Image (cartoon, coloured by chain):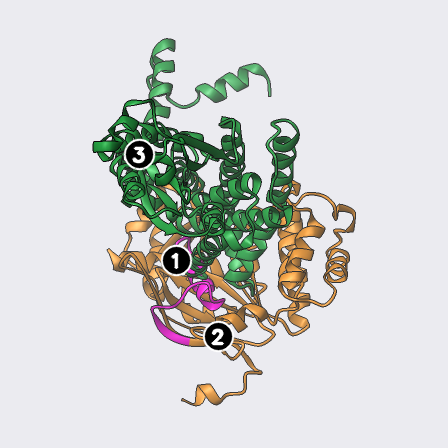
Amino acid sequence: MSDLVRPATDIAIDVSGLTKIFAGKKVVDNLSLRVKRGHIQGFLGPNGSGKTTTIRMLCGLLTPDAGEGRCLGLDIRTQQEEIKRHVGYMTQGFSLYRDLTIRENLEFVARIYGLVAPEDAAQAALERLGLTARADQLAGELSGGWKQRLALGACILPAPSLLLLDEPTAGVDPKARRDFWDEIHHLANEGLTVLVSTHYMDEAERCHEIAYILDGKLLVSGTIEDTIRNARLTTYVVKGEGLDALAAELNRAPGVDMVAPFGAALHVGGRDRQAMEAVAARYADRAHRWMQDEPTLEDVFIELMTRNHRSGQ
Amino acid sequence: MNEASVRRDIQRDIQPARRGALAQSWQRLVAMFVKEFIQLRRDRPTLGMIVGIPLIQLLLFGYAINTDPKHLPTAVLVSDDSPLARALVGALRATDYFHVKYVVQGEQRADQLIRSNEVQFVIQIPPDFSRRLVRGERPSLLIVADATDPTATAGAIAAASGAVIQALDRELTGALATLAQNSPPFDLQVHRRYNPAGEARRNIVPGLIGTILTMTMLIYTALSVTREIERGTMEALLAMPVKPVEIMLGKITPYVVVGGVQMATILIVATFLFRVPIVGSLFVLVPLTLLFIVANLSMGYTLSTVAANQLQAIQMTFFFFLPSMLLSGFLFPFYGMPVWAQYLGEGLPLTHYLRIVRSVMLKGSGYGDLAADAGALALFTLVAMSVAVMRFRQTLD
């Protein structure tokens, strides 16, 4: 087991074979993942694919039924107490105290983590977050964007080495999302490792590496370029009239592996280049313009999802 | 958007068929009814408690409560070991009201027994009782009753005089028969100690202190864990490096202060409005009351770790509260209950606290007299806290 002797400096998350079973169903199935220190790891997958369960196993909130691994060099099965000290976990829903003010929430967190001067730590966090003016406002009265900002602030207040963010930007406006991601990159530059689950492709593209999970299984992991290249998709962007009807027809056409509407266009793709080109030639007519294009990350994921659901049925 | 376009917007889709206005209202009611029923049905423990609570409590209290208590713990202070004295004690025993647990010599020992709630009666037979009786001097036979609970002792006192006269009738035969013909050849004196006038409020007000504190303290902590779960804050809390013991003590302590304030309020009102004296020391009453408060807070917290939601927590609180009222000796005499119910009662903090508060306020008992009850409260607290810490799930598994 050379993995165990590896110095814990370059790999922040190193887990293999993680499995969690709820009511007889494998919610996470034999998942292995390795995240480098200082990297931002995107964690993607549809709702119910096991992202939250995986994150909870990483931070010691759930015990894996099988598999093993380390977070920051600490065993996720036996050293949960220690892991909690060094991992910041931002839950999917807002989980700070709504009936405490922003300052009170931050001071609470600072005390729980045993910081020397909790009031000062909270004040510093307030300034960093730009929340000084709202310090005495109840956390429950904040808008979605500010809540999320506060939650992140509370997470990084005890200076963790690893951040686990579970859909942190769900329901947040684009400006706040962009600010949030700037902050994440800033933190990663300082050496913090971040694992962030998201449904937004633009956010996925801001990660150093991504992992895609479906029905508890890890389907793809690596950089975005690798992910797109490895998918070997031939994709076309189709524009024109009656795209809904065309989409329904293409879904049944041999050689087509994914069909997805994007605004006023249709993305059509297939893994078999020749078959796909034949389809394009067949369907290109006066009403529809077919243009070959590089596959996007979203195309790749839709194809992955479609394929797995077809094979599952 | 103008009105026409709004209407067009609403009417754009084909509308499903709807009922008339009254029928719609009825259907909305049905919708709420069906929804509530489904939710109730999903909550298994609550469903169990719907039938369980009334059934258990009805059976429990139906069999346990008895307003005419018998077999009351009694000490006999015999200074005159004559056949006549023995016959009298035998007669009192035969009434079924007096259960002679101790036969003692000194008055001091007798006092101590009654102060520490070991006995409710001391029957005193003076040194030369039979000799003076034979001489026709009408000696007095003394029954000292612990009147902190007047209802508990009333029946026994009433039964005592009749029993003693009958016993003498049987004993005084032959030459002594003439004595029996007169009105009682002795003077039966009853001392209702600690509450000579038999005032109910001297019994009820101290009891209320315990009952009120039980109710308020239980609810405070019973909701504390379930509230964190329902508001979603538990997940973040569990992800932080905080231990179950720390969470528990941190949640209980503020309410000890709250309980202290309540205690002070009640004691002030009890003293100045209801004129219930505090015979004993506040240095005994206050610390032991705080101990009782902690015991109830721990119990509430334990319920909170068992309940899945706030509704369950409240139901459990009541499930605990009602026996506390009925089996502790607050409303009905403790010794009136069958033995199994007394054992149940011994498991309730209120039972022990009632003894403490009544004894300190009315009898002036000290730590020495109340060690057993104080110990029981401490033990209860310890057990409840241990269960809570073990029950507390540190993960979301």
Query: Which residue does the image show at 50% across and 31% down from the upper left?
Result: B204
Callout in the foreground (3, 2) = 3
Q: Mark 1 to mark 2: distance in Å?
A: 26 Å
Residue A120 left/right relative to B162: right
Q: Are marks 1 and 2 in contact (CB under 8 Å)?
A: no
Q: Quadrant of the N terminus of chain A?
A: bottom left
Where residue B102 appears, as percent x and y from the top left, is 36, 50
Name the chain letter of the residue that bears numbered label 1.
A
Q: Which residue is mark 3?
A: B61
Tell me what hue chain A is rendered in: orange
Q: Chain of mark 2?
A: A
Above or below for A240 versus A54: above
Q: Which residues are magenta?
A: A46-68
Q: Amino acid at mark 1?
A: Ser
Circle on res. A262: none
Give a yes or no on whether discs 1 and 2 share a subunit: yes
Q: Both on one chain, marks 3 and 2?
A: no
Check disc 2 and give the amino acid type.
Answer: Gln
Q: Residue at x 58, y 83 (%)?
A: A9
> Does residue B173 appear in the picture of this structure?
no
Which of A173/A27 is in front?
Answer: A27
Q: Residues within 10 Å of mark 2 (few under 14, many from 20)?
A: some
Label 1 vs 2, first from the N-terminus:
1
Judging by the rendered image, the residue that carries numbered circle 2 is A79
Disc 1 designates what residue? Answer: A49
Please tell me whether residue A65 belongs to the stretch shown in magenta: yes
In 3D space, how far apart are the residues under numbered discs 3 and 1 (Cα atoms)?
53 Å
**Helix, strand or loop at mark 1:** loop
Q: Is residue A101 left or right of residue B376?
A: right
Q: What's the amino acid at mark 3?
A: Phe
Chain identifier of the green chain: B
| Disc 3 from disc 2: Cα separation | 50 Å
